[in-house]
């Protein structure tokens, strides 16, 4: 037994065109909201979220980077010579820990700018400090922090990375007391 629709071809076509128009409107709304890109791939616009460390310490306790973010890994960087007249390879040539930290973070800032990123995009930082002879061979954490806080958690740049700071036995060249590597991310 054959069944025929009681709807006319014109009515079926009108329903089809109405459904097609509704689909187009919904696709436009979803694309505008950033849930799906115009290429059809999922691109939920989620920001990078930062959880501050307890006690107001100027680092993030945790950072969540959403899928689809651009992530850039910078190799460890060391400071530039601060005093060319000082003996080569001496701590005096590079300065104290605070001076070396500022120099290194300025180099990182330049490297990030070349990637169209800023220090505000840094999500993870590893700081390697050599014991300072002026501090009985112990790392100068306070000196590193005095340099670090000029760049992170400021009014101009409030973002703070998750961070690890450790003392190491030595770095690649004599006189170096600071090496810093970072991971930066930009949400889609």
Image (cartoon, helix red, strand yellow):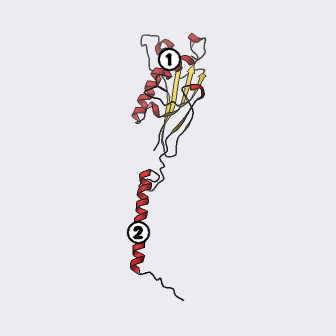
Secondary structure under the numbered disc 1 in the rendered image: helix
Percent x, y of residue 71: 49, 40
Give the number of marks.
2
Percent x, y of residue 7: 44, 81
Measure the C-alpha gap from mark 2 to mark 1: 68 Å
Q: Nearer the viewer, residue 61 or 70?
A: 61
Q: Residues within 10 Å of mark 2 (few under 14, many from 20)?
A: few
**Residue sitting at 48 percent across and 53 percent down?**
42
Q: Nearer the viewer, residue 132 or 174?
A: 132
Q: Nearer the viewer, residue 186 or 55?
A: 55
Percent x, y of residue 105: 46, 25
Mark closest to the chain's N terminus, 2 or 1: 2
Q: Residues within 10 Å of mark 1 (few under 14, many from 20)?
A: many
**Residue sitting at 52 percent across and 24 percent down?**
179
The residue where tag 2 is placed is: 18
The residue where tag 1 is placed is: 98
12 in relation to 106, above or below: below
Secondary structure under the numbered disc 2 in the rendered image: helix
């Amino acid at each position: 037994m054959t069944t025929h629709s009681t709807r006319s071809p014109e009515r079926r076509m009108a329903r089809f065109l109405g459904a097609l128009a509704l689909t187009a409107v919904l696709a436009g709304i979803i694309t505008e909201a950033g849930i799906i890109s115009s290429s059809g791939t999922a691109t939920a616009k989620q920001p990078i979220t930062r959880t501050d460390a307890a006690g107001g310490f100027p680092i993030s306790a945790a950072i969540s980077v959403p899928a689809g973010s651009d992530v850039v890994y910078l190799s460890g960087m060391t400071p530039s010579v601060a005093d060319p007249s000082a003996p080569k390879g001496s701590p005096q040539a590079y300065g104290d820990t605070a001076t070396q930290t500022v120099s290194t973070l300025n180099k990182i800032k330049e490297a990030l700018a070349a990637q169209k990123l800023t220090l505000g995009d840094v999500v993870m930082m590893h700081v390697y400090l050599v014991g300072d002879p002026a501090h009985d061979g112990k790392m100068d954490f306070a000196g590193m922090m005095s340099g670090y806080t000029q760049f992170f958690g400021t009014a101009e740049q409030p973002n703070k990375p998750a961070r690890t700071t450790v003392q190491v036995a030595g770095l690649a060249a004599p006189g170096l007391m600071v090496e810093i590597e970072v991971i930066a991310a930009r949400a889609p």
